[in-house]
């Protein structure tokens, strides 16, 4: 009974029952398992508050990545709007040139003495 108690529903925890398959001690997304980080259910409140600063650092890092992704998305949207505006302007110029040339050819066909 010298082992620290661990929540059996926590991720990356080996189950103590014989009918379940053993789980790996590390997760591909979170790195070290909870038991490897020293997070147990019998942690004192002081230890939990010390661990809290690490968690706030992780949240800050996540927020920085999230904000970077959002700002990249906004930049991409602005760039796409600019590209579409340029394509629209080129299309308008080409359409205007087409209409003007057809108009001149029509006038020359209808009244050739102009």
Image (tube, helix red, strand yellow):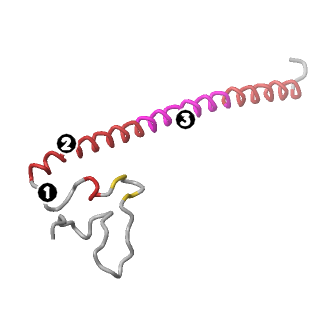
Residue located at (36% from left, 53% from top): 30
Q: Which residue is under mark 2? A: 53
Q: Which residue is mark 3?
A: 80
Question: Magenta stretch: residue 30 in it?
Answer: no
- Furthest residue in direction left, as rendered: 45
Compared with 40, 84 (above or below) is above
Magenta stretch prevailing secondary structure: helix
On-image quarter of the N terminus: bottom left
Q: CA distance from mark 2 to mark 1?
A: 15 Å
In the depicted view, which residue is nearer to us: 33 or 61?
A: 33
| Mark 2 vs mark 3: in front | 2
- Residue for point 49% across, 36% down: 77
Of residues 108 and 97, which is closer to you in this image? 97
* Residue 105, image quadrant: top right
Q: Label 1: state its secondary structure.
A: loop
Q: Secondary structure at mark 3?
A: helix
Question: Which is nearer the eye, 96 or 3?
Answer: 3
Residue 15 in percent (x, y) is at 30, 73
Q: CA distance from mark 2 to mark 3?
A: 41 Å
Provide the residue span drawn in magenta: 71-91
Q: Residue furthest bottom?
A: 19
The C terminus appears in which quarter of the rendering? top right
Provide the residue designation for mark 1: 43
Identify the residue at horizontal 42%, vertical 56% (top origin).
Answer: 28
Residue 66 locus on image (x, y percent): 37, 42
Front label number (1 vs 3): 1
């Amino acid at each position: 009974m010298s082992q620290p108690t661990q929540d059996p529903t926590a991720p990356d925890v080996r189950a103590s029952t014989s009918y379940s398959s053993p789980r790996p001690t590390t997760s591909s997304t979170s790195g070290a398992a909870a038991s490897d980080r020293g997070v147990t259910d019998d942690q004192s409140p002081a230890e939990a508050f010390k661990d809290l600063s690490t968690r706030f650092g992780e949240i800050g890092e996540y927020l920085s990545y999230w904000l970077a992704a959002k700002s990249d998305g906004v930049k991409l949207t602005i760039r796409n709007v600019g590209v579409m505006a340029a394509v629209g302007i080129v299309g308008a110029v080409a359409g205007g040139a087409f209409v003007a040339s057809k108009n001149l050819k029509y006038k020359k066909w209808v009244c050739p003495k102009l």
